[in-house]
Amino acid sequence: MSTRREATRRRLFEAAVTLISEQGFGATSVDQIAERAGVAKGTVYYNFSGKAELYRALMEWGVQRLTDHLNVAAVGPPREALANVLRTELEFIGTHESLARLLMAEAWRTRQSWYDTVRQIRSGAIGVISGLLEDLVAEGDLPGDLDIGVAASGLFGMVLTVALDWRTLQPERPVEEIHATLVRLIDGFLTT
Amino acid sequence: MSTRREATRRRLFEAAVTLISEQGFGATSVDQIAERAGVAKGTVYYNFSGKAELYRALMEWGVQRLTDHLNVAAVGPPREALANVLRTELEFIGTHESLARLLMAEAWRTRQSWYDTVRQIRSGAIGVISGLLEDLVAEGDLPGDLDIGVAASGLFGMVLTVALDWRTLQPERPVEEIHATLVRLIDGFLTT
Amino acid sequence: MSTRREATRRRLFEAAVTLISEQGFGATSVDQIAERAGVAKGTVYYNFSGKAELYRALMEWGVQRLTDHLNVAAVGPPREALANVLRTELEFIGTHESLARLLMAEAWRTRQSWYDTVRQIRSGAIGVISGLLEDLVAEGDLPGDLDIGVAASGLFGMVLTVALDWRTLQPERPVEEIHATLVRLIDGFLTT
Amino acid sequence: MSTRREATRRRLFEAAVTLISEQGFGATSVDQIAERAGVAKGTVYYNFSGKAELYRALMEWGVQRLTDHLNVAAVGPPREALANVLRTELEFIGTHESLARLLMAEAWRTRQSWYDTVRQIRSGAIGVISGLLEDLVAEGDLPGDLDIGVAASGLFGMVLTVALDWRTLQPERPVEEIHATLVRLIDGFLTT
DNA sequence: CATGAATGAGCTTTCATTCAT
DNA sequence: CATGAATGAAAGCTCATTCAT
């Protein structure tokens, strides 16, 4: 049944991601989103309780895709798995640039209605990395007293920052070059 | 002279930093800023040509402080200078949390009138790190084919992410603990 | 035949009376009515041509019940008949509070599409009282120069106001107490 | 000082009374009110927090005028005072028809944000009548066991209904005729 | 008979900006 | 220098109505 409704929601998500990532939440009007999605403005309100709820749902939808990708990549021996995960993060951002910008821009904004959603989202993504770091500690590849939470957050942020700078300043460079530099940074860390 | 005017401007800056960092530019109204600063709304327009100009001036004001701090820290032998710079970045974010959040949130937003200001700001901060990495290459502490731009961006983003996660999730932890973990990550990289 | 349809219409009436009497016509949405009646929104439009038509039909349905009650009570010697009618009005309002509120609220609003319907309704109810006052004049119980229209309107309004104040402010009081006070007021009038 | 603001508020009140009494709260748009008052739409929101608040303030403003009039009339020996008060009510409604319709129409609507204001208002007006009835009881002109609250509500409602029917159906009749009939109804009651 | 997703006109509300004081 | 009442364009949102199923 309600396949139609699902399709409409997806079209709204896709329209909203691009617009909001470019202009920000406040500068993007519901009119714009509806027009880009090819539906009437009222349809937005039929499917979501308001603009903020559309935004919240949008982030949930988008981040689930990132977490899914990372989880798929997090297999095999921990070292390879970690390299895989970070490369996947890099590639994902290259492919879903809009979504990544949006998450980055709003992740640090407290006192917004969607703050909790954003935090949960980040935790999910960083959690994948934390898990692998724990495996590495268990195997003796990392010192037992390492603060895993901080380290995972740092790795995640490093890749994210590099990826967005890449897309923003030098989008013509191939992903391999960026990845190679990242691997160097991380390898040093792992051989400690 | 015009000390009164200067005082008014500073009060407006201080009111604006907090509000905008928490709520974002779009969600913060001129009314709110004026009220928090304890002046009438018209006074904002007497001191700035408009909301956007207030925002631009605010970012310039704030970022100059960050760059100044980093430059002061970037002295001495490169290795120590780098550690110093990253520690200073960490501390600065701890002390000027609002400003850091604000810069982070807007840094990735293209198509905004203040985009150029933000990019310039980031370049200034990352430039300090790039300079030190170049020194390290020159001294043979880092391989000559390292992509310095990417590496500097990565280090900067790592510290920024860790710092904001720290302030957001575990603000009670002392800065030393966070710093120690960061140094470990970076040392590994340098010993490669 | 069409028993199902009749049942649906009645459910819509009952849902609408309560909601509109509490919130007013304008503040009550078709969504609310449909939800309270337990049907889909489209069903309202399948059974009525629109919201205004539903409202008109609702008032006709409700007022016919009031007039019927009053006519039944208006039998016997004029004095007893009058007392009976006023008591019936009081009781009817106690039992059909929502409907009474609704009629009262809309009765004084000119320039509405249903204004004529409402006036007709009031005329019907007040007409029953007028008839009895004429009988009393004929029997010499009231002076011949009494303005019957004004008097009937006054009696009707007195009972209506008392009844609604009773239901609103002291709903726990028994109808007899209210009625007793009303009879005193009216008796004085009749013995003049 | 803010005389200007006061003047604006009064103009909005005067515009709103007429429109709302004719069309109802829901059917009257803020645009209409602003246009009739000769101010911009935004001015409504600068002076009131919203449409509902304008409405609430409007009723408070209007009813204060009624209560003031009634209180002025409630002087002298109780019998004359009562006759005076009821005549004043009648005249007030003749002069401020819009306001009276509006109060009547909304007085019975529970579950509205302005419900409490309306109730308070009615209590004020009816309170003047209650006070006089108590005086009459004290002087032995009325039986000591009379339910004064119910009686006052009845008298108030009688005059209100008569007055509005007069304005609606026979506006050309002089107030004296209507008043004379009312006095007859009430005199009977007092001689009991 | 009934449904509920979709519509869009029209509404309420917000807010950057202006300007007389 | 500073104020705050007023503005109006533009936004968010509601809801009676339509229609394919």
Image (cartoon, coloured by chain):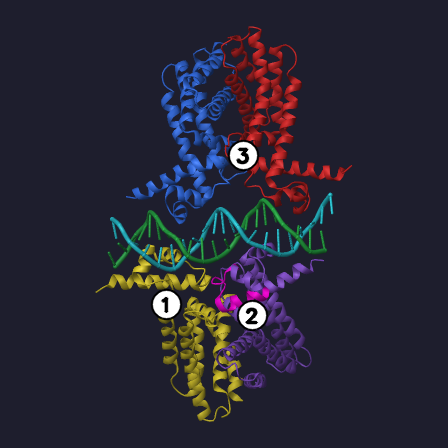
Chain colours: A blue, B red, C yellow, D purple, E green, F cyan
The residue under label 3 is which amino acid type? Arg
Horizontally, residue F9 falls left or right of residue B1, namely left
Distance in Å between CA atoms under marks 1 and 3: 52 Å
Residue A41: numbered disc: none
Place of residue B88 in the rendered image (x, y in percent of width and height, measured from the top left):
63, 20
Q: Secondary structure of the magenta portion, mostly?
A: helix
The residue under label 1 is which amino acid type? Leu
> Which residue lies under the disc numbered 1?
C58
Place of residue A47 in the rendered image (x, y in percent of width and height, measured from the top left):
38, 45
Residue D99: numbered disc: 2
Task: Kindly indicate the quadrant of the structure image that contains residue D70.
Answer: bottom right
Distance in Å between CA atoms under marks 1 and 2: 27 Å
Q: Residue furthest left?
A: C1
- Foreground pick, D185 / A16: A16
Callouts 1 and 2 on one subunit? no
- Foreground pick, B34 / B87: B34
Residue D19 visible somewhere in the drawing: yes
Distance in Å between CA atoms under marks 3 and 2: 49 Å
Mark 2 falls within which chain? D
Query: What residue range appears in magenta?
Result: D13-30
Query: Which-is-in-front pick, marks 1 and 2?
Result: 2
What element does badge 3 sit on? loop
- Foreground pick, E19 / D58: E19
> Which residue lies under the disc numbered 3?
A109
Looking at the image, is D131 positioned above or below residue C133?
above
- Foreground pick, C78 / D97: D97
Mark 1 falls within which chain? C
Quarter of the picture containing the N terminus of chain C is bottom left
